[in-house]
Image (cartoon, coloured by chain):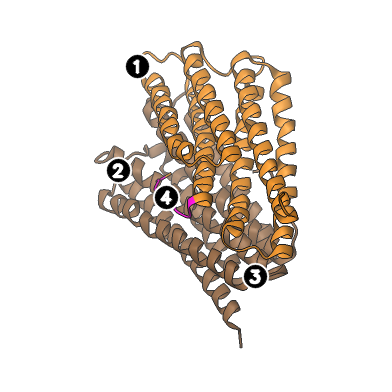
Chain colours: A orange, B brown
Amino acid sequence: MRDAFHEELDAINHTLIEMCQLSGHAMEQATTALLTADLKLAEEVISDDDKIDNLYHDLDARILNLMARQQPVAGDLRALVTSIRMSADLERMGDMAHHVAKIARMRYPATAVPLELSLTLQEMGDAAKRIIDKTTHILQSHDTDAALQLEKDDDEMDKLHRQLFRILLDDSWPHGNETAIDMTLLGRYYERCADHAVVVAGNVYFLVTGEYINSNN
Amino acid sequence: MRDAFHEELDAINHTLIEMCQLSGHAMEQATTALLTADLKLAEEVISDDDKIDNLYHDLDARILNLMARQQPVAGDLRALVTSIRMSADLERMGDMAHHVAKIARMRYPATAVPLELSLTLQEMGDAAKRIIDKTTHILQSHDTDAALQLEKDDDEMDKLHRQLFRILLDDSWPHGNETAIDMTLLGRYYERCADHAVVVAGNVYFLVTGEYINSNN
């Protein structure tokens, strides 16, 4: 049986998992709203971001409280300290979905993404969702191999990001600068979302091993 | 006289201040490298980023160690927990300077920024430097009024960011998409750098007051 401290630690990890799932869901819905010009869905993503923000502030208070009451050491301390960091990254993953949804809303009733790029953006959205789902798994399982592996999935996102630029830079690009700017920002939101997920996975790796994954974000 | 614990806490804060100063210096140099196509300076910013990264990892170890040995409570605990978070944001401020310098290097021997935008980019660089300098002051003084005030400086950055887009979107914009993309990314790097600084200031506010500044980043 787990003692009270470890039960609270489990509950904290459970909230981190919930934040990760919510941000994955938000990113998936934001991508759909973006590609189908679905205003209602975009509004939903924008207002749901408050849920993630509230979980974040509430979690902070719980972690500080537990630290102060229980005076953890070694692995337990590392678990709390990494939780403090991971919650900030998870909160920002939610912000990225919020940013994507705001571009969808801003361009409504038009579709923000031109036909030439809708496949690439769909793939970026899918890649973000996949990376977030794996991060959820890593939070659940503390699987360090999967945490190391996640950098590779992030390479896939970087590849899509470069592909996006290649299409934008093609001489035959028929859309104006406004669309080019929207697309550049969208690319950056998906890429940053994946980066934050990789940082979360890196924190799980550090939590388990006490070592840092060497990466230059 | 301060006891050993508070001396170590002072030393940690001193390192945070140093990281903030280094990232401010890096951002200033990156802006100069960008606007004058100075390859040597760009390379310097890129390689100096390792210094900030090393401080970051070293600081993490010191904070964890101090937490484990001293079992701090209340304000002391909050100081350590906020330090853990601030160091991550300060490290990413350095990354933003690194990204700006990489665009300068990529376009060398050409100047990455066209004439129409060099003033705006200079102003964004100045605004970033000013915000980072104020954040350094806030870390030194724990001045909560200044921390609240910093949101307003960030509004100035957002205004410059919109101005950048206005120029990019002007029908008379004579440069291609490649330049538009570079400028969009640069705008985002300066804006994010300022955002991270505001998050650091918000952490100082939380450290002193136990309350969050209400902001939606």
Q: Chain of mark 4?
A: B
Instruction: Give the image quarter of residue B114.
Output: top left
Can residue B122 be seen here? yes
The single residue placed furthest to the front in the displayed view is: A1
Residue sticking out furthest to the top = A115
Query: Subunit of mark 1?
Result: A
* Mark 4, secondary structure of its residue: helix
Residue B125 falls left or right of residue B150: left
Kindly identify which chain the residue marked by label 2 belongs to. Answer: B
Tell me whether circle 4 and circle 3 mark residues in contact (CB < 8 Å).
no
Please report the residue visible at 74 percent of the width from the left and 59 percent of the height from the top.
A65
- Give the residue pinned by disc 1: A171
Q: CA distance from mark 4 to mark 1?
A: 30 Å
Q: Which residues are magenta?
A: A209-216
Q: Residues within 10 Å of mark 3 (few under 14, many from 20)?
A: some
- Measured as percent of width and height from the top left, residue B19 is found at 47, 62
Amino acid type of the residue that numbered disc 3 sits on in the rendered structure: Gln
The residue that mark 4 highlights is B97
Which x, y percent locates residue B194?
55, 50
**Residue displayed at 61% across by 84% down:** B2
The tag earlier along the polypeptide, 4 or 3, is 3
Instruction: Say which amino acid is labelled 2.
Output: Arg
